[in-house]
Amino acid sequence: MAILSPSDMAVFAAQKLDPHAHIDPMFSVSPLGLVWSDEVPRRGGLSAEGWGVWKRLFMARCGIHGGHLLTGEVLKFWNDAKESVKWIGFSRLTLTPEERAIYDEIMHVRQPSPPRPRRTLLDFFKELIDR
């Protein structure tokens, strides 16, 4: 079973690895991981299904960058994609020290803040009165 349509496959194959590509801040504000400027297909290039594959590849690579092992369905998808999809993101499974620093900074900044203690309605009114 093909992962991508022929037209989506052509979009992935047309992307060229740029050794000067930069981590794209527009796409790397995600708390998930890093995206390089040469990895995002041109607007309108992929079908909805093609974007779905791109997102799944990105998410799996984010897991790898985070030190997680791929398992189950994700591992099967990853292995199938590596056999059939020409995605330049497969060449960026290991981060350089500079990329790791950016990744760690993004992940640290994006960590959810601890939950605030819940206040009861009575506590709320007491605070209003004490002001």
Image (cartoon, rainbow, N blue to C red):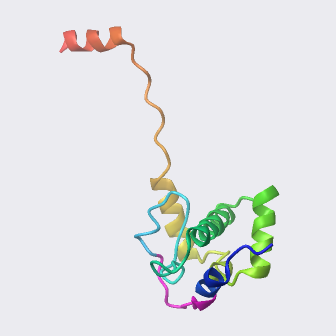
Q: Foreground: 58 or 14? A: 14
Quarter occupied by the N terminus: bottom right
Figure check: 75 above or below 37: above
Q: Residue furthest left?
A: 131
101 to the left or right of 66: left
Q: Foreground: 42 or 23? A: 42
Tally of numbered tags: 0
Figure check: 11 above or below 48: below
Q: Foreground: 26 or 98? A: 26
The residue drawn where x is 34% and y is 8% is 122
Decide if residue 71 is in sight here.
Answer: no
Decide if residue 17 is in sight here.
Answer: yes
Figure check: 86 above or below 99: below
Give the x, y percent position of residue 35. 52, 73
Magenta: main secondary structure: loop
Reply yes or no: does residue 64 show up in magenta.
no
The residue drawn where x is 35% and y is 12% is 121
Reply yes or no: does residue 20 show up in magenta.
yes
49 to the left or right of 105: right
Q: Which residues are magenta?
A: 13-23
Give the x, y percent position of residue 17. 58, 89
The residue drawn where x is 71% and y is 80% is 85
37 to the left or right of 79: left
Give the x, y percent position of residue 131. 17, 15
Give the x, y percent position of residue 46. 55, 77
Q: Foreground: 81 or 70? A: 81
